[in-house]
Image: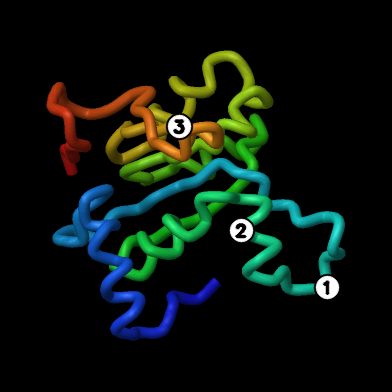
Amino acid sequence: MPRLPQSAEFDALAKNMERVISSAVKRNIAVIADASFAEIGQSVVPSLAHVNKTVPFFGMLAGLSYIGHCVWMFEGHPSALAAGCRDADVLIVDSAMAQFLTAGWQDTAAGTMRNPNILLHDRQTFKLRALRKVGAGANLEFQH
């Protein structure tokens, strides 16, 4: 998806994204979520409503993209895990997909990430929880 167009409404919403990951330095954000949209067919572009139903935190991802971060999504299949996380500063995992990840997935992901910050988006609480992060502080830190 292309970045959302600049608007006063989106600017106001984007201020909340600064608390998640500051836009002072543009970051690479990988996301493991259900990206198949198989039930609508490959030749149809999914609607925003459909994507938001499949990935309930899609608005947050769009907001992170809006403030300048590069965001990509994949399903976390073992054959694509290392490549999908390569050079990422943050990995966000949908809690609905975590059960499908293979043993040792965090080590594999962190091994190819630029900054091994791994967060879990909990669908029940709609909160992010750190599974692994750089530094000891409460906020995400970045070595590079």
Please name the residue that numbered disc 2 is placed on.
Answer: 52
Question: Mark 1, mark 2: which one is toward the viewer?
Answer: 2
Can you tell which mark lies on residue 139? none
Question: Mark 2, mark 3: which one is toward the viewer?
Answer: 2
Q: Earlier in the sequence, mark 2 or mark 3?
A: 2
Please name the residue that numbered disc 3 is placed on.
Answer: 120
Q: CA distance from mark 1 to mark 2?
A: 19 Å
Residue placed most toward the observer, 111 or 127: 127
Please name the residue that numbered disc 1 is placed on.
Answer: 43
**Can you give x and y, in whole percent of width and height, for residue 61 in the image?**
44, 57
Three-letter amino acid code at the position of disc 1:
Ser
Query: Where's the N terminus, which quadrant?
Result: bottom right
Left-right relation of 108 to 101: left
**Can you give x and y, in whole percent of width and height, for residue 19 in the image?**
21, 50
Q: Does 125 appear above or below 66?
A: above
Three-letter amino acid code at the position of disc 2:
Asn
Q: Quadrant of residue 87?
A: top left
Callout 3 crowding tier (Cα within 10 Å): few <14, some 14–19, many ≥20: many
Q: CA distance from mark 1 to mark 3?
A: 31 Å
SS for tag 3? Answer: strand
Query: Where's the C terminus, which quadrant?
Result: top left
SS for tag 1? Answer: loop
Question: Mark 1, mark 3: which one is toward the viewer?
Answer: 3
